[in-house]
Image: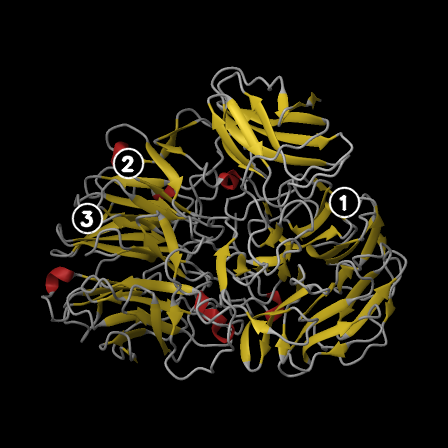
Amino acid sequence: MRRTRVLTAALALAAGLLAGTPPALAADGAAPAPLAAESYTWKNARIDGGGFVPGIVFNRKEKNLAYARTDIGGAYRWQQGSRTWTPLLDSVGWDKWGHTGVVSLASDSVDPNRVYAAVGTYTNSWDPGNGAVMRSADRGASWQRTDLPFKLGGNMPGRGMGERLAVDPNRNSVLYLGAPSGKGLWRSTDSGVTWSQVANFPNVGNYVQDPSDTSGYASDNQGIVWVTFDESTGTSGSATKTVYVGVADTDNAVYRSTDAGATWSRLAGQPTGYLAHKGVLDTVNGQLYLAYSDKGGPYDGGKGRLYRYTTATGTWTDISPVAEADTYYGFSGLTLDRQRPGTVMATAYSSWWPDTQIFRSTDSGGTWTKAWDYTSYPNRENRYTMDVSSSPWLTWGANPSPPEQSPKLGWMTESLEIDPFDSNRMMYGTGATVYGTENLTAWDSGGRFTVKPMVQGLEETAVNDLASPPAGAPLLSALGDVGGFRHTDLTKVPSMMFTSPNFTTTTSLDFAGSDPNTVVRTGDLDSGPHVAFSTDNGANWFAGTDPSGVSGGGTVAAAADGSRFVWSPAGTGVHHTTGFGTSWSASSGIPAGALVESDRVDAKTFYGFKSGRFYVSSDGGATFAASPATGLPSGDSVRFQALPGTKGDIWLAGGASNGAYGLWHSTDGGRSFTKLSGVEQADTIGFGKAAPGASYQTLYTSAKIAGVRGVFRSTDEGVSWTRINDDAHQWGWTGAAITGDPRVYGRVYVSTNGRGVVYGDTSAPGGGDDGGGGTDPVPTGACAVTYTVTNQWAGGFQADVKLANTGTSAWSGWSLNWAFTGGQKVSQLWNAEYTQSGGSVTVRNTGWNGTVAAGSSVGFGFTGTWSGANAKPAAFTLGEQTCAVN
């Protein structure tokens, strides 16, 4: 899955469970005093991963101390006790959003409490700020920052090379940083407080991915890409004498200093025609290993080599595991086993099809074995087994033909590290997760090592849209790269992303205001439809058809009763349809590219916005008329929503610092808007359950109020606002979407650009979780069950269960029981809670789906294993009632 989040403007910015004490960022210099924040608890709606992890760094002195860097979602520290990752850069604020992109990370092997991060997302105009080096003396719990006179590119081409930032292992006050954009090599001699360019370093690099790219994204010089110290050439307290530096120059890729950086020279005899993605030194045997590719990655790379350089003699040896003619990929992911000198591994990072490859040698590259190989094409034999039960969506719901397999071993595998204290533990990053193993040496004895996600707590999705329906799942999300998810339990990883179709990026989603089972989403797809519909609250989907000219998802709106839809796709104008998009008709009176939303009460009323004008349709989207409203933002960095339950009540947020910017309210269907005087800037608006005693729904916004940027809540229709986040919880850019929960007062869902969906709960009276637990509910009245096996494979299956209230009174809770007779065992269940003892299964409602009206139904699904015959249960009971079986 290609992961390309390129930010062309503020509006285009889109793209774990928090563990430990949240870190705080103390920038050098004074900051404005924040507004008093209400006490909120912040967590992630668990997805686990979802983005590219280009770097994993183990500390060489302290066991179990490891860090991961992401390209747009900050940095993380490994928590060995819980086997989770703790986010370290949530304190990065709105104005410094680019500092959530981490191009390199260094852990101090002299003082393990010290860690450094080189931050900045883009080197071109998309990121308006320069890069910085963050430094921490408490493992990332708090930070200080030194701003640099140039930009850094955590999400630029070549970001998988490295590490570009390195701490001298003998004199840890000395650090080096390789810069992009022709800015050269930089050095600090005071533990990262100040930096100066190494003036005599002879080569600033010259490799660019695409010189013709006028945006500056693919045409930037990738610069200095890694720094490696030979710790054997120094003593404690004195600077290491020998330093190796990798340069993005296919003819001059590796340089060395033997006098602690006073002079530098190109390594003689080195291979040409390639970029050295990694340079890793085995000081025990005096060997520098280098992984080469003809391209900078992380997507591209058609040829590659592995070399070993003997430091004592200057001898170069090609140790590539395959002939150059047989490579269609570059090498990266280079690592050594520090417990077993001579054991080296590398990845074929750019092998997209049929899978990535991992190579292993136990004799310093003399011979190699592969993680998988062909038996007789297209059949393959793996040296590993994969267990993605903790993140089942990693299969992408795919059933590929050999030699492809699902889940894949990985792609974009530029980071791969063997734990320096444990030969059995290895972690590697992919474009979607962190995988790991804890029995790696089984590889050498002919056994199979087990690969599992080691990613809990690391949340790196970019969020484009959010919805919290009044019934069904509490959260639906539209995400970059992985499409989106239906969360029935915020604390659990959903079993699958949206499928049928799988959009590479979902750009917009909506549900019918009075029928939350009807959901629509739009998104980007290389080939195929760009719109999909669901009639069961997003649990299952079917594709619609595209009108002519559609090239991307755009925005979409569902009528209040789900009878029709209005779609503003990329590539063509606004269209409308009745039913589920089998045919579309062009809408008139509204420009192409307009944002569209629906009235949440009147099924024929839709709204639009484009370039400062508001548009209204009263005939189901067939025709629009421009509103006479004036004073709205002139640009298109706007988001607006209609209030559920009230016709014509609209809130609009957006603008730009060089014009109108703020929050507007209309109570007459968009004919006029009033700007809220107390809101200086606002970028999102959403609604949630009214506060206890209040009649108007709670408002939420990502805004600037009283000079402070933050997430704000109003319980009095925007008269007053309370900041509900704090300086430790800012998450960079939060301007894509926000929504409250209509069932839980105080709960808010916040979009981030790389830290996933963050949700907060208030500690105030009336807030927090809305139920669950207690004694088993005992509903009365008749019931019926439909049990459907939706997918089955060797040893496993997936099933959906529909429980219908066929009686005459509502249930206020339910508990369904059945018995398996074929050795089945539930692995993961969503939309409900369950227990299993032997073959007996009990499934209970969660806090949000306990009420089931007469004539209505509730559904849940699960995955499971089976060892005998996967027979369906013969009987179901609801409390003491026996249900009919359909």
Question: Which residue sits at x=53%, y=26%?
Answer: 841
Q: For mark 3, what is the residue?
A: 338
Q: Residues within 10 Å of mark 1 (few under 14, many from 20)?
A: some
Q: Which mark is residue 439?
A: 2
Q: Residue furthest left?
A: 235
Displayed quadrant of residue 126 = bottom right
Residue 531, x across and y down, in percent: 71, 48
Q: Amino acid at mark 2?
A: Asn
Q: Residues within 10 Å of mark 3 (few under 14, many from 20)?
A: some
Q: Is residue 601 left or right of residue 733?
A: right
CA–CA distance in space, label 2 to label 1: 48 Å
Residue 11, x across and y down, in percent: 62, 68
Badge 2 or badge 1: first in the primary sequence = 2
Residue 793, x across and y down, in percent: 53, 24
Q: Amino acid at mark 3?
A: Arg
The quarter of the rendered structure image containing the C terminus is top right
CA–CA distance in space, label 1 to label 3: 56 Å
Q: Which mark is residue 545?
A: 1
The foreground one among 804 and 624 is 804
Displayed quadrant of residue 538 = top right
